[in-house]
Amino acid sequence: MDRSFLDWPFFEDRHRVLAQGLEEWAVGALPVDHGDVDGACRGLVRALGDAGWLAHSGGEALDVRALCVIRETLARHDGLADFAFAMQGLGMGAVTLFGNAAQRDWLERTRAGRAIAGFALTEPGSGSDVARLATSARRDGDGWVLDGEKTYISNGGIADVYVIVARTGEAPGARGLSAFLLPADTAGLEVISRIAVMAPHPLAHLRLTGVRLPDDALIGQPGQGFRIAMTVLDHFRPTVGAAALGFARRALDEALARVRSRQIQGAPMAELQMVQGHLADMALKIDAAALLIYRAAWAKDQGAPRITREAAMAKLYATEIAQEVIDQAVQLHGGDGVRTGSTVESLYREIRALRIYEGASDVQRVVIARSILEGA
């Protein structure tokens, strides 16, 4: 396992200490049994909270490099553990960055692993195009009434609290959205279906029917919902790349073990030049992805107001090359690579969603291109 990247100047000693401590914890605690996915996620959130790792998921500020180190480490050991950690951060990211004192009570619970968070942005008719979001929130006396549907919501069905983005109509399109904190036991919120995917995670389709929220459920100001959502994604998109990097590093480790032990014509596969070429390509892609990820994280931690371009580059490249690295690892395993339950087969299923969620790869290309054109 190559950990030399921790010596790069992007990191401070506290990040190296964090990485070492989490690695030692993960070796003893992961992976967990995924047979009951809901139960596994609940258990992982509790364990991550008890061990103190969720303290990094939110608070007075977000250390993006720490988030990336944690996601990379957890993903290398157990994709579901990475998911459990990531959703505590993403789900409460709006509260960390914009929440009031009352809302931050929930943040303390999610950081301790005593409550599970969800971030409800995607809708049946608006995934990548957030400006087309249709869920509505209207003023009603001293509160709000929300109606609409959300889909592919991570932790849907097991979350204790959601951040919901809804249309309040201050202006057309993206400028007319607002963000709200919604406890899961609020009347009118319904889980209408659970969504099964190729790498099982808790996902659900939610319906809001006359959901009443008090005025202080509003996060930030009316009309700031799009800005809040994009600011949260600016912080967390590099961490998606970090999770992909963790998957890719594990795939390379598995490939190295395979080619060193597997004999072909009386010699290890590792002695074949073509195999060596594949390994070199895998290592090259991994280092290039790591550089992009930790550049973006470092820039945000240094106070950059926006890292939209850097985050998009990190997320796009890392998730795309992780798919390639894992695919090559499967190929080097031969028939064993497609055997259900093998590590590389699991990685092959885990990586695919990362090229879609929090901004699909083609959306990231558009973001990067627009940034280049605006700067030309």
Image (cartoon, rainbow, N blue to C red):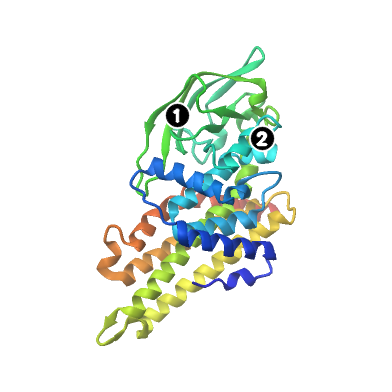
In the drawing, does residue 194 fall left or right of residue 335?
A: right
Disc 1 residue crowd, few under 14, some 14–19, many 20+, Cα 10 Å: many
Of all residues shown, which one is farthest toward the right? 303
**Which residue is the extreme one toward the top?**
141
Q: Looking at the picture, which amino acid does disc 1 mark?
A: Leu
Observer-nearest of 95 and 296: 95
Q: Earlier in the sequence, mark 2 or mark 1?
A: 2
Task: Please name the residue that numbered disc 1 is placed on.
Answer: 206
167 above or below 234?
above
Q: Residue at x 69, y 37 (%)?
A: 98
24 versus 1 height, above or below: above
Residue 140: horizontal and vertical position, in percent? 62, 13
Name the residue nearer the viewer: 345 or 361: 345
Dividing the picture into quadrants, the one containing residue 334 is bottom left
- The picture quadrant where one finds residue 257 is bottom left
Number of residue marks: 2
- Quadrant of the image containing the C terminus: bottom right
Q: Secondary structure at mark 1?
A: strand
x then y, percent, for residue 304: 73, 53
Residue projecting furthest to the bottom: 266
Q: Tell me if residue 254 can be seen.
A: yes
Q: In the figure, 258 relative to 300: above or below?
A: below
Q: Which residue is mark 2?
A: 104
Instruction: Say which quarter of the image contains residue 146.
Output: top right
Position of residue 192 relative to residue 347, above or below, is: above
The mark found on residue 256 in the picture is none
Residue 375, percent from left and from top: 70, 55
The residue type indicated by label 2 comes to: Arg
